Image: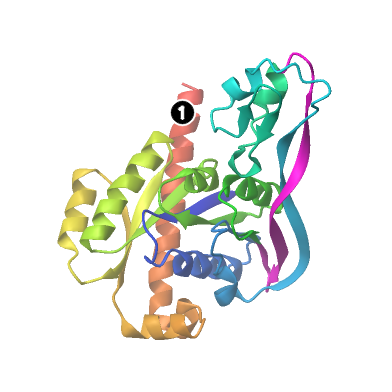
Amino acid sequence: MPMKIAIASGKGGTGKTTIAANLAHLFSQQGRKVTYLDCDVEAPNGHIFLKPQLTEHSPATTLIPQIDLGRCIHCGKCGRICQFNALLCLPEKVVTFPEMCHACGACLLVCPAEAITEIPREIGSIDQGMAGSIIFARGLLNIGEVMSPPLIRALKSKAEEGEVTIVDAPPGTSCPVIESIRDCDYVVLVTEPTPFGLNDLELAVEVVRALDLSFGVVVNRAGLNDQPMLDFCTEQNILVLAQLPDDRRVAEAYSRGQLICEALPDFKARFFSLMAAMETAILGRQIKSSERSNP
């Protein structure tokens, strides 16, 4: 059964990419066709652990409005419809702010004089290749760009999906995260047992529930002060998929760019248990969805 699994977190530094890269590796070892998408386009680092051979490099663009001042009648409709202040209508001209444009196309639709066309603007790049048998793709946002969702959309549309697709999402709970996870079958929220980790997990749970996505939690660096985190998951009826212990050897392997499941064989069983728990949860969701569709 094809699965698209997002690995996300409410905050950075919880071990999200570590989990994503190890899952991609182990799924591929089972003989499955695996795709790994590094959607953390402001700081992609999955390549450090999967070590892909990148064979394709292409620019990623978004469409921005171009005003034909010879046809513009200065009605101001384009400026009023833009919710992102990317257009400023002055008495004699229209000023555009490309960095603020969300490429929604609303200005093009409302212009009565057909004075607006759309032109491409490069915002980043997409690299594709193979990491062993894993289909690997990553996005890299240009320095100074603030709009990463268009690049994430381009990355997801270009990459070939496998039997298992692992989406390494950006940290946080804002638009880039939503764009990364919104069409996934399951979301793994990676957290850590700290006050900051709990606070940001609560925010991340609100997001995935608002999107009506099935999800579970992985507690990384477990063993420090787990009880508040576990109590929250129990109160909210959240499945704890795995607890990965705080272990100095993990940090050492990470600093060398090694996959944890290969550097530390005793962790491999924990990852296999995590994989089984995810597949069971996804299957259960699919069965419930089928029952609702065919009562």
Residue in view at x 71 percent, y 63 percent:
127
| For residue 161, above or below residue 54 | above
Q: Depth check: 179 or 184 in front?
A: 179
Name which residue type carries label 1. Answer: Glu
The magenta region covers: 111-137
Residue 47 colored magenta? no
Q: Main secondary structure of the magenta part?
A: strand
Residue 118 colored magenta? yes
Provide the residue designation for mark 1: 291
Q: Depth check: 107 or 35 in front?
A: 107
Number of other residues with Cα within 10 Å of mark 1, as a class: few under 14, some 14 to 19, many 20 or more: few
Percent position (x, y) of residue 60? 72, 52
Residue in view at x 46 percent, y 21 percent:
295
Percent position (x, y) of residue 2? 60, 49
Colour scheme employed for the rendering of this structure: rainbow
Percent position (x, y) of residue 96? 66, 36
